[in-house]
Image (cartoon, rainbow, N blue to C red):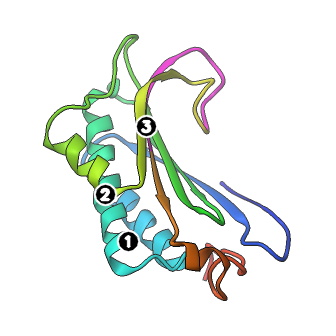
Amino acid sequence: MVDTTGGASARRTARLELRGPTSRTPLPAVRAMTGDLAMRMDFDLDAVEDLRLAVDEASATLAAIAQPGTPLVTVFEAGPEGLEIPAWVSTAAGTDVPRDGFGWAVIAALVDSVEAGPSTQADVPAGDGSDGPVASITLTKELPPALRTAPGGGGADLSVAR
């Protein structure tokens, strides 16, 4: 799904959803989508790689606590300020996102902000509106200030198609 909004004079917000199994096999697709969007938004190469690693670690963390047979849902919201990536999986009631260990330290170090915790399908992007339990991680990486207003940065539309 692609949803774009915004005026002609500002970078538009693009919203993409990616659903895939919670096995290790499709996780590279999530990492590749992240890198592609970050490059199109003019993040520098270090920031692109940081985002790829953070998304990879967040996806693996969520896959480890997901209910069997349920998808990993990743939503990419690319806008004029940067890239926000909420990801979630269906879980058993009361399941929380582990925030200890090396994996969490990696995630927190590579993005500008990270939020995680239990929620419901009604409260997450692309949820089904039910009160089914989920665990979510939301990563945010801000564009450098110069890219928010510079030609090719903040003044251009974001295109997710080549």
Disc on res. 115: 3
Q: Are marks 1 and 2 in contact (CB under 8 Å)?
A: no
In front: 21, or 78? 78
Image coords of residue 131 (percent x, y):
58, 14
* Few, some or many residues within 10 Å of mark 1 (<14, 14–19, 20+): many
Q: What element carries label 2?
A: helix
Determine if residue 35 is in view: yes
Q: Residue at x 45, y 36 (%)?
A: 88
- The image quadrant of residue 135 is top left
Q: Where is residue 39 in the image (x, y as percent from the top left)?
A: 47, 77
Residue nearest the observer in this picture, 159 or 69: 159
Residue ID at (33%, 40%): 22
Q: Residue furthest top?
A: 93
Query: Tag 3: residue type?
Result: Glu
Which kind of residue does numbered mark 2 sit on?
A: Leu
For label 1, the SS is helix
- The three-letter code of the residue at mark 1 reads Val
Q: Which of marks 1 and 2 is in front?
A: 2
The residue indicated by pointer 2 is 110
Distance CA(mark 1)–CA(mark 2): 10 Å
Q: What stretch is highlighted in magenta?
A: 126-138
Marks 2 and 3, the one that precedes in the sequence: 2
37 relative to 113, above or below: below
Among the 4 quarters of the image, the one containing residue 122: top right
Q: Distance between the residues labelled 2 and 3?
A: 13 Å
Estimate how packed mark 3 is, as few (under 14), some (14 to 19) or many (20 or more) residues with alpha carbons within 10 Å.
few
At 24% from the left and 41% from the top, the residue drawn is 104
